[in-house]
Image: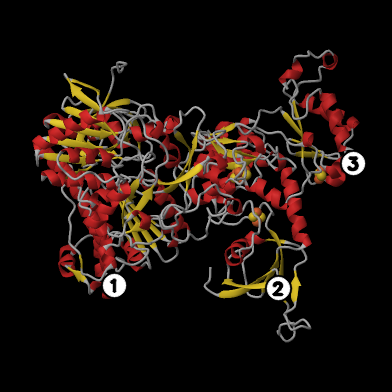
């Protein structure tokens, strides 16, 4: 779009707007005039397929000889109208353009198109899930004919309950062939797994990928479908749109902080408890736009799982038995009191800021500073505070002239929405560099793919920085505020620079966003990689600029919040060397790592705050003395801080599982027994106290977090206009705290080297954990409808290693690492780098280390005994 | 596998187009030639050759009437019954052809010789009724000409008409179509 402002006359009234915008958006946004649409969607290229948006278009006449405007007798410019109507969605605003949206011809065209669309439509609105929020229904009421000239028995009969994969059901009769679903998959996602089959009235949507509809984003097609042709299996026939309350919420899965709305309703059989009937995206252009991953959409079912812990448990005569809250709190408080400052805390990925604040208050009260974060493999997050992506940045702003680097992360698996956004930035012309030790799907869209050997990510970034320094692609004015530049230059002298072109594209980019993950890294490696990324951003002048900066691909929904409140992975690791006397596991599946499972046995008492009482949360440890049931994100309110440092608020959607309490409250009760002041009465008050104590969060009061930033284009605001079930931003769009680079102070660069890494002995390989989107953590696996999509436990072995070890694809193998034995199926291909076995986390229920270590892989020749 | 068996032809097809995806139709023809129709496996093979999801290949094979996704007879008879052809008697011709071969619309004769289906415009509207037999055109047809052609094709295939048997056809046979 050019920045030229032009005048468009709509129905005779002049409106100012940027040149080049399509007529549908232009009329809606600048004049508040509706041009009805079906196939157009503001997040996709216009295709002009449905013809619903027909308008009359004219241009101001000019005298051919003189080039002067031809005027009417009254002095107004004469308009030459086109001979036929044209589609508004595919026509862009230019100077001197006039359109008419209310003429007889336009009105008739709308009526005709609707009659045509309905000629083969089943009109089963009374039993259709879309009824009540259906653009076809709404536009028919507004613009359609009252009756049809088509007899019902001539309608084409097609399949009505066709599964498109495990999660979406297709009703072919309702489909109006707008191709939004297909275009979403092809354009937005890049998984071309949907298509039309046959043609004309026999046309239907198909998917024959393996498995069918193989994508992490399929649920969004049900949102953008302008009719009830695509429905999700869990919401189908579940409720009417107008019966639900849409509770603003935040995805508890992953670092993106997808803004969502939980549609809740009282069910006849739900015993007076509201249920989440569906999860819809809530528009936030700075976060997830209007898309959510299927994990976020369908994973929420864990909140109502019967496996949730309902009551506190207390160890009595060797057994964990149900207990009252007061007994449980008494026991927990007693243990904490006796341990004094030898209390350690490990906080898991779904602990909210309020929970963490109360936990740290409790630790502070007894004089402990052992505030650990789970997982334990993360490095020092300080570079994020220094050069994290600038507050208010949007990935949607990236395009031609910009660059994105993704390093040590499989974005599709770890942060699917960022995968979409990085891919689309590349589609818009941004230079995408993907650097990993293994292939990832994002490689397809990259201008440069850098495949490095295990543990060489830091060298890659150092090489990029060295290239920027030696070619003077640095930014002179930025260097004025940099400490340590000369030392960095000296330290990098002689560094290999094999990726000069990538370095140049990134350094010279107008905007540069760098995603840094922890794939294949131990904590030292992760620390070094984050720092190395910061160095590049700083010396090339990108740090602190809008739409620039570092994005850490943290594992959890509130990992950043935990860091902000003084928790660290380092503290967690320190507990291995120096075990606390009492260990509080707050939503941390620590026993999923054998080293920490052993730690549980070495402490005197474990107090576990958890939603699920399972082995990972300490259920099998004899030291676990108190287990407290805590509430999920849907049962309470609170805040999560995304990895882009955006503090976002979510609201209570339904009642608690059993007697569970919000973690902050449970912690407050323990504190109260220890003589701390009475805990605040609401999470809003906890946050109030937090804002007074934590400088970074001084602005983040609940009322401030509830403020809604203007969204453009406003997609959720009018469901029938853009034809999406997407909700508007109501409830708050959150506030990101600024990085230090956004201030004026000095920035520091510091040379880092790759740590030594893992040195496998003879016969050993590196066993490197891998994060997968779909896993068997209870916060996902109890959403049983997803089971078909979760892979069996596997280990990816490089072809060369496999042939040396005599392992074939599909063999049962056992991976021995750090005392753990993990039984999996071998997937043999070139996906894993040579010498490295990739072992997905939480696919197997067997404990495995969260950091890369040396180990062995052995084929199981004996049949595995059934257990 | 097409990939091994027709490596040269496939290479020649790809060489013709700047974009691999453009080779989809020629590859579908190749698969149909090899397997008799576009089998589900063929969709996967072509998808792998081009580097797209099989869904995209099926979309193309489903759109065009030249591709068949179910097994077909040795002779594949496609008759246009679109409006211009219908005006020249194509619809009636088609019905008579079905009756002659004792087969349903879109079906295959019990002996596996003929598959008969109606298609949209064959671009020979002025010479209707028009029929394509395995992509060879036969124009200005009537049933006399048609019977002669059928006899000829049967002979070519070494399966002369089971004349008397045709009348007392086993009722179960129609189910096989
Ligand atoms: S299923 Fe829905 S989104 Fe897809 S083409 Fe049909 S109407 Fe459009
Ligand atoms: S043709 Fe314009 S919205 Fe469909
Ligand atoms: S309409 Fe029958 S061949 Fe053209």
**Local SS, label 3:** loop
Residue at image point 47% right, 43% down: A217
Residue under label 3: B88
Residue under label 1: A475
Q: Quadrant of residue A78?
A: bottom right
In the rendered image, residue A521, in percent from the top left (x then y), is placed at 23, 46
- Whether marks 2 and 1 lie on the same chain: yes
**Image height of B169 relative to A116, above or below:** above
- Whether marks 2 and 3 lie on the same chain: no
Q: Does the residue at mark 1 contact the one at mark 3 (Cβ under 8 Å)?
A: no
Residue at image point 79% right, 83% down: A73
In the rendered image, residue A146, in percent from the top left (x then y), is placed at 77, 47
**Image height of A81 relative to A239, above or below:** below
Quadrant where the C terminus of chain A is found in the figure: top left
Nearer the N terminus, badge 2 or badge 1?
A: 2
Residue under label 2: A59
**Image height of B67 relative to A570, above or below:** above
Q: Is residue A771 left or right of residue B80?
A: left
User: Crowding near pointer 2: few (<14 within 10 Å), some, many (20+)?
Assistant: some
Q: CA distance from mark 2 to mark 3?
A: 46 Å
């Amino acid at each position: 779009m050019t920045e030229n402002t032009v005048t468009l006359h709509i129905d005779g009234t002049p409106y100012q707007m940027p040149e080049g915008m399509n007529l549908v958006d232009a009329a809606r946004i600048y004049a508040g005039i509706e041009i009805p649409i079906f196939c157009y969607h503001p997040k996709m290229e216009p295709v002009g397929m449905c013809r619903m948006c027909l308008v009359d278009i004219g241009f101001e006449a000019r005298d051919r000889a003189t080039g002067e405007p031809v005027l009417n007798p009254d002095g107004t410019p004469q308009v030459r109208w086109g001979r036929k109507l044209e589609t508004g969605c595919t026509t862009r605003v230019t100077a001197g353009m006039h359109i008419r949206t209310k003429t007889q011809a336009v009105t008739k065209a709308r009526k005709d198109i609707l009659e045509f669309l309905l000629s083969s439509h089943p009109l089963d609105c009374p039993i259709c899930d879309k009824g009540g929020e259906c653009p076809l229904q709404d536009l028919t009421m507004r613009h359609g004919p009252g009756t049809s000239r088509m007899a019902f028995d001539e309608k084409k009969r097609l399949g009505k309950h066709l599964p498109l994969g495990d999660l979406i059901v297709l009703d072919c009769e309702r489909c109006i062939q707008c191709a939004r679903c297909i275009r979403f998959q092809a354009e937005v996602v890049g998984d071309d797994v949907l298509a039309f089959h046959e043609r004309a009235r026999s046309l239907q949507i198909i998917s024959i990928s393996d498995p069918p509809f193989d994508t992490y984003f399929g649920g969004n097609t049900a949102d953008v479908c302008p009719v009830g042709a695509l429905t999700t299996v869990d919401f189908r026939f579940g409720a009417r749109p107008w019966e639900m309350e849409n509770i603003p919420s935040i995805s508890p899965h992953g670092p993106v902080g997808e803004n969502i709305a939980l549609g809740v309703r009282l069910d006849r059989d739900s015993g007076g408890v509201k249920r989440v009937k569906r999860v819809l995206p809530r528009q936030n252009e700075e976060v997830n736009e209007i898309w959510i991953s299927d994990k976020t959409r369908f994973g929420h079912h864990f909140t109502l799982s019967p496996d949730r812990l309902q009551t506190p448990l207390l160890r009595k005569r060797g057994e964990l038995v149900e207990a009252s809250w007061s007994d449980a709190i008494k026991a927990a408080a007693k243990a904490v009191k006796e341990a004094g400052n030898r209390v350690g805390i490990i906080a898991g990925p779904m602990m909210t800021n309020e929970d963490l604040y109360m936990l740290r208050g409790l630790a502070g009260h007894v004089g402990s500073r052992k505030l650990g974060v789970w997982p334990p493999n993360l490095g020092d997050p300080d570079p994020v505070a220094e050069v994290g992506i600038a507050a208010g940045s949007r990935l949607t702003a990236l395009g031609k002239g910009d660059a994105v680097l993704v390093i040590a992360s499989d974005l599709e698996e770890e942060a699917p929405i960022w995968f979409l956004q990085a891919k689309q930035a590349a589609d818009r012309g941004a230079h995408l560099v993907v650097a990993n030790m293994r292939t990832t799907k994002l490689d397809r869209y990259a201008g440069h793919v850098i495949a490095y050997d295990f543990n060489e990510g830091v060298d890659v970034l150092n090489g990029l920085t060295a290239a920027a320094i030696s070619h003077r692609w640095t930014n002179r004015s930025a260097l004025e505020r940099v400490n340590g530049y000369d030392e960095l230059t000296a330290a990098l002298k002689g560094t290999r620079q094999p990726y000069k072109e990538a370095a140049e594209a990134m350094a010279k980019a107008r905007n540069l966003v760098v995603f840094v993950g922890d794939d294949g890294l131990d904590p030292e490696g992760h620390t070094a990689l984050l720092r190395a990324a910061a160095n590049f951003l700083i010396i090339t002048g990108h740090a602190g600029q809008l739409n620039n900066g570092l994005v850490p691909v943290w594992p959890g929904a509130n990992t950043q919040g935990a860091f902000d409140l003084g928790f660290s992975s380092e503290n967690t690791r320190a507990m291995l060397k120096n075990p606390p006397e009492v260990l509080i596991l707050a939503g941390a599946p620590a026993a999923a790592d054998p080293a920490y499972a052993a730690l549980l046995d070495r402490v005197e008492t474990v107090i576990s705050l958890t939603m699920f009482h399972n082995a990972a949360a300490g259920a099998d440890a004899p030291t676990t003395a108190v287990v407290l049931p805590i509430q999920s994100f849907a049962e309470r309110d609170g805040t999560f801080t995304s990895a882009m440092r955006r503090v976002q608020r979510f609201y209570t959607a339904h009642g608690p599982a059993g007697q569970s309490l919000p973690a902050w409250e449970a912690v407050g009760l323990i504190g109260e027994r220890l003589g701390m002041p009475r805990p605040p009465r609401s999470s809003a008050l906890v946050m109030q106290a937090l804002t007074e104590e934590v400088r970074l969060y001084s602005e983040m009061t609940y009322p401030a977090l509830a403020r809604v930033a203007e969204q453009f284009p406003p997609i959720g605001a009018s469901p029938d206009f853009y034809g999406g079930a997407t909700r508007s931003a109501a409830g708050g769009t959150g506030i990101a705290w600024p990085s230090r680079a956004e201030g004026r102070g000095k920035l520091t660069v510091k040379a880092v080297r790759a740590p030594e890494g893992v040195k496998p002995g003879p016969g050993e390989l590196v066993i490197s954990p891998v994060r997968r989107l779909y896993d068997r953590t209870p916060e996902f696996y109890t959403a049983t409808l997803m089971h078909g999509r979760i892979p069996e436990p596997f280990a990816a072995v490089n072809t060369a290693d496999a042939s040396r070890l005599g392992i074939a694809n599909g063999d049962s193998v056992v991976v021995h690492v750090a005392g753990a034995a993990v039984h999996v199926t071998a997937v043999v291909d070139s996906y894993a780098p040579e010498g490295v076995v990739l072992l997905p986390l939480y696919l197997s229920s067997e404990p495995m280390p969260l950091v890369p270590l040396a180990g062995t892989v052995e084929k199981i020749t004996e049949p595995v005994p059934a257990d | 596998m097409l990939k091994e068996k027709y490596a040269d032809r496939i290479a020649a097809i790809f060489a013709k187009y700047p974009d691999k995806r453009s080779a989809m139709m020629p590859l579908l023809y190749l698969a149909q030639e090899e397997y008799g129709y576009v089998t589900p496996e063929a969709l996967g093979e072509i998808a792998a050759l081009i580097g797209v999801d099989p869904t995209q290949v099926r979309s193309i094979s489903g759109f065009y009437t030249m591709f068949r996704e179910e097994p077909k007879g040795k002779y594949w008879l496609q008759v246009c019954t679109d409006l211009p052809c219908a005006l020249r008697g194509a619809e009636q011709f088609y019905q008579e052809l079905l009756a002659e071969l004792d087969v349903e619309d879109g079906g295959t004769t019990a002996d596996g010789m003929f598959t008969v289906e109606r298609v949209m415009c064959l671009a020979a509207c002025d010479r209707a009724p028009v029929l394509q037999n395995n992509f060879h055109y036969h124009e200005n047809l009537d049933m006399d000409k048609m019977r002669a052609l059928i006899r000829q094709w049967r002979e070519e295939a070494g399966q002369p008409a089971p004349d008397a048997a045709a009348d007392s056809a086993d009722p179960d046979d129609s189910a096989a179509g």
